[in-house]
Amino acid sequence: MKLNAKYFIEKLNLKKHPEGGYYKESFTSQDTIGSRQLWTSIYFLLNSGEVSHFHRLKSDELWYFHDGEALTIYMISPSGELIEKQVGLNIEQGEAPQVLVPKGYIFGSTMNNEGFSLVGCMVSPGFQFQDFELFTRKELLEKYPYYKDIIKKLTVA
């Protein structure tokens, strides 16, 4: 049986994510650093044509490929470098089963092919919404005009 996005959305009880796609918190650490959980983990799914809009976290985020097609993560480093990484299993084509997005990087993701991508994302120290910063197109175009094509793709007008 070939599994599709609808199957995973229903079986994993995924909900619409504010940044785009679908998600569900899957695990949280019982250990804490101060008042924060040591780590949190979610399932995250994008369909063809959907994007995860450019945003930034105050913690590292590690992405794990689970099923479907490769997902492309676009990152803008604090020094302004654009980095493109593929999360997938076709290692010969430059994909990696795990990709790290360092804290402080602006990042978003998209499907560059048909189908869907199911990944896991673990944030450490644990994710809290007050650490989530979503960017507008205007903000990013003012700072990084040379990346206008990908900024237009991964932001809301």
Image: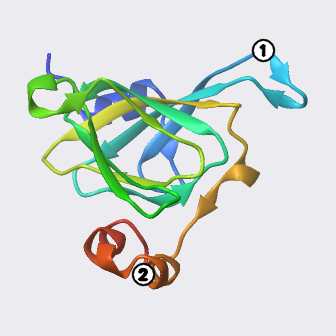
In this orientation, which residue lies closer to the viewer: 24 or 81? 81
At 10% across and 32% down in the image, what residue appears?
A: 93
Q: Which amino acid, by three-letter code, is at mark 1?
A: Gln
Q: Amino acid at mark 2?
A: Leu
Give percent across and percent down for residue 153.
30, 69
Q: Which residue is mark 2?
A: 141
Element at label 2 = helix
Looking at the picture, does residue 55 appear above or below residue 116?
A: below
The quadrant of the image that shows the N terminus is top left
| Residue at the (51%, 43%) spot, across then down | 15
Q: Which mark is residue 30?
A: 1
Q: Position of residue 57 (x, y in %)?
A: 61, 49
State the image coordinates of residue 62 (x, y, percent, origin top left).
48, 30
Q: Residues within 10 Å of mark 2 (few under 14, many from 20)?
A: some
Alpha carbon distance from label 1 to label 2: 40 Å
Q: Position of residue 30 (x, y in %)?
A: 78, 14
Q: Quadrant of residue 63?
A: top left
Colouring style: rainbow
Instruction: Give the vertical position of 113 relative to 31 (above or below).
Output: below
Position of the C terminus by quadrant? bottom left
Judge from the rendering whether residue 143 lies leftward or rightward of residue 48; answer left or right.
Answer: right
Q: Is residue 139 above or below residue 120?
A: below
Residue drawn where x is 42% and y is 70% of the image: 155
From the image, state whether disc 1 or disc 2 is nearer to you. 2
- Looking at the image, is 64 positioned above or below residue 129? above
| Residue in the image at 19% along x and 34% along y | 69
In this view of the protein, which residue sits in the foreground, 152 or 156? Answer: 152
Q: Viewed as shown, does residue 107 lie left or right of 104?
A: left
| Quadrant of res 154 | bottom left
Residues tagged 1 and 2 counted as in contact (Cβ below 8 A)? no
